[in-house]
Image (cartoon, helix red, strand yellow):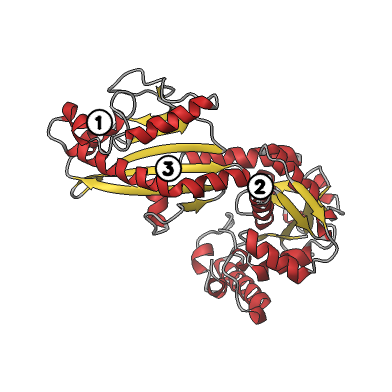
Amino acid sequence: MSGDDCSQNWNAAVIGCGVSPVDPMPSCRASRPPPKWYFEAEERAGAEAFAREARAAGVKRIIYLGGLGPTFELRASIIIGSGSLSFEMVRALVEKLPVMVTPRWVQRLAQPIGIEDVIAYLLESAELPASKAGTYEIGGPDQLAYRDLLVTYARLRGLRRLIFRVPVLTPRLSSLWLGLVTPVYARIGRKLVDSIQHDTVVTDQRAREVFSVVPRGVEEAIRRALANEDREFAATRWSDAVSSVGVRSQWGGQPFARRVVDARYRVVDVGPARAFNAIERIGGSTGWYYADWLWRLRGWMDLLVGGAGLRRGRRNPERLLPGDTVDWWRVEAVEPGRLLRLRAEMRLPGRAWLQFEVESALEGARIWQTAIFDPIGLAGRLYWYVLYPVHSLIFAGMLRALARSAAAPDRRGAGAAVRAWR
């Protein structure tokens, strides 16, 4: 949310809730940076507006999740999970920088807690008797320095990182540095740096006595956060996701979490079922509809480094099932008439998917083609952006030819007729 939104009337969030949990009160910290002089004022105004509406609606209990200072109030150090500023900062530093020059605060202790455990605490807070109301400090079982958290994340992602500590980075310089290499705005980064110049560990153990939650260790929390992202990512309909941000395609692709996405569509004047037939025949003897010589060159290069290349072909020229091979791809998901998702099994500095979706349109059917890349470290990012001009040319040509194939009168003979630039 924007800073202006924080002081708006929160009537919609609380009216009719009664004793049920209400929508989370928004925070300005993950938004665009407000002017320096009203950062704290906007946070306070938003909280006061929320409290007024909660009181007017008869809400009996407010559960507040804040940083490591009634109602039930939960205080935490680093939350491990997508969207947490501290976690996104750690992720960006490790993913982008093979060598890190860090300030002294990386030696400060933190006590991370997984997002699933935080949610468990919040849910249990709603069930506790009012006599238990108070401020509770929550955290996982591990206390470790920020440096160790960086190293742990890198190891779980299969990356090697060199970290050098220097004594000369002031909080202001640190915040500007974070603003350059992470999603954190410099002014918000300053707040984060100010908060982590001191140890942020649990000193009051009452939460363990009152709550039944048993938090996971930091390694398991990171693994689960990454696995949850993969599950949510696999279930994403890119036709909806890309449309919701108002971007059809841009140079370098659209960033989503740690991944980059190139999504584009084309409308054809045939029904969805017929459009999907052309998609389902892709690869093997049909080819890839555009610049097949480049696909063969890439397959040959993959063979040289021990990959699968294009030699595997496909099991059936007309139909695909989950688990089937399509040249160097494997079918990860298929919904007849609607979706085909292929996972790359070529040698890459990351993970890649190619996804096709078909949806009804006024003119007939809309074919969405989405290339998804999850880069591993700097090598993965360089691979994506250096080759993006070539990939963009191939993706655009493939979609055009695929659309022509779908619209061709002779379905079985269309493939050979529309293959371009062979």
Q: Residue at x 40, y 52 (%)?
A: 242
Residue 277, numbered label: 1
Asked whether the viewer can see residue 215, the reply is no
Q: How far is disc 2 from disc 3 in space, using C-alphas?
A: 29 Å
Distance CA(mark 3)–CA(mark 1): 20 Å
Identify the secondary structure beneath mark 1: helix
Q: Position of residue 377 (x, y in %)?
A: 62, 44
User: Residue at horizontal 55%, vertical 27%?
Assistant: 305
Q: Nearer the viewer, residue 52 or 257?
A: 257
Q: Position of residue 269 (x, y in %)?
A: 17, 44
The image quarter in which residue 405 lies: top left
- The residue that mark 3 highlights is 371
**Residue drawn at the location 44% of the way across and 33% of the way down:** 298
Q: Amino acid at mark 2?
A: Ile
Residue tagged 2: 115
Identity of the residue furthest to the top in this view:
315
